[in-house]
Image: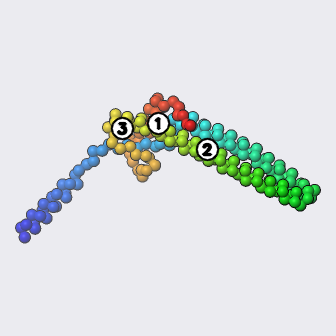
């Protein structure tokens, strides 16, 4: 009975005293979207993307107008052309439509690929800055703000990193 009493007392004291352990890890978080959207290099990338989107949109509108004009021309010639000539031109028009859709898909894929490469290069340029900042400020963990539910605003280092990033990185090359 005495052994059981000592065992329960020992375990009770052990568990009650272990609750007073505090974490010594320094944690910070960063909003990568703020850095990307507000940094000079990020703004240049965003401008390039918008310019490519405008160019693609203009090209798509021109192709659409050409396709619509060809279709309207074929419709007006329906009664003038022979049935087999009309069907031949209709097949040609459908092939042009397929080609038009392939061009649109290719341009959209190229734009998406450009955006992915640009973001990857951007974050590759950001990583050494984050590493040196963490080392200088004794930060053990830097988390993405998107992965947090709630946190003290004093742990947000986005503005500090934005300033450092603007100082160290002027432009990011995208192949």
Discs 3/2, front: 2
| Residue placed furthest toward the left | 2
User: Residue sitting at 20 percent across and 54 percent down?
Assistant: 18
Is residue 46 among the parts visible in the rendering?
A: yes
SS for callout 2: helix
Q: Is residue 47 left or right of residue 76?
A: left
| In contact (CB < 8 Å): disc 3 and disc 2 | no
Residue under numbered circle 3: 134
Q: How many marks?
A: 3
Q: Is residue 163 visible?
A: no
Whole-number angstrom distance, CA of label 2 to CA of label 1: 21 Å
Q: Residue furthest right?
A: 80
Q: Which residue is mark 2?
A: 111
Mark closer to the chain start, 1 or 3? 1
Residue 87 placed where, x, y %? 84, 59
Residue found at the far bottom of this picture: 1
Q: Position of residue 146 (x, y in %)?
A: 46, 49
- Examine the image and state in which quarter residue 155 appears: top left
Task: Tell me where residue 126 appears, x and y as whole percent.
Answer: 45, 37
Label 1 sits on a secondary structure element that is helix
Q: Earlier in the sequence, mark 2 or mark 1?
A: 2
Q: How is the image coloured?
A: rainbow
Q: Which mark is residue 67?
A: none
Give the quarter of the image for residue 76: bottom right
What is the C-alpha distance between the residues marked 1 and 3?
A: 15 Å
Q: Residue at x 79, y 47 (%)?
A: 65
In this picture, residue 4 sits left or right of residue 174 = left
161 relative to 139 in the view: left or right:
right
Task: Say which quadrant the C terminus sits in.
Answer: top right
Q: Residue at x 27, y 47 (%)?
A: 23
Q: Are marks 2 and 1 in contact (CB under 8 Å)?
A: no
Q: Which residue is mark 1?
A: 125
């Amino acid at each position: 009975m005495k052994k059981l009493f000592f065992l329960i007392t020992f375990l009770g004291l052990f568990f009650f005293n272990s609750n007073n352990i505090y974490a010594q890890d320094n944690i910070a978080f960063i909003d990568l979207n703020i850095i990307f959207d507000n940094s000079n290099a990020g703004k240049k990338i965003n401008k390039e993307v918008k310019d490519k989107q405008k160019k693609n949109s203009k090209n798509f509108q021109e192709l659409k107008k050409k396709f619509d004009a060809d279709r309207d021309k074929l419709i007006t010639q329906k009664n003038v052309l022979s049935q087999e000539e009309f069907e031949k031109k209709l097949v040609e028009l459908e092939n042009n439509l397929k080609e038009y859709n392939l061009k649109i898909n290719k341009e959209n894929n190229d734009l998406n690929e450009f955006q992915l490469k640009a973001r990857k290069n951007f974050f590759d340029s950001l990583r050494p800055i984050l590493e040196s900042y963490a080392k200088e400020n004794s930060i053990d963990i830097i988390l993405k703000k998107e992965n947090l539910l709630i946190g003290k605003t004093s742990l947000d280092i986005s503005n500090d990193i934005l300033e450092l990033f603007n100082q160290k990185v002027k432009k990011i090359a995208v192949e």
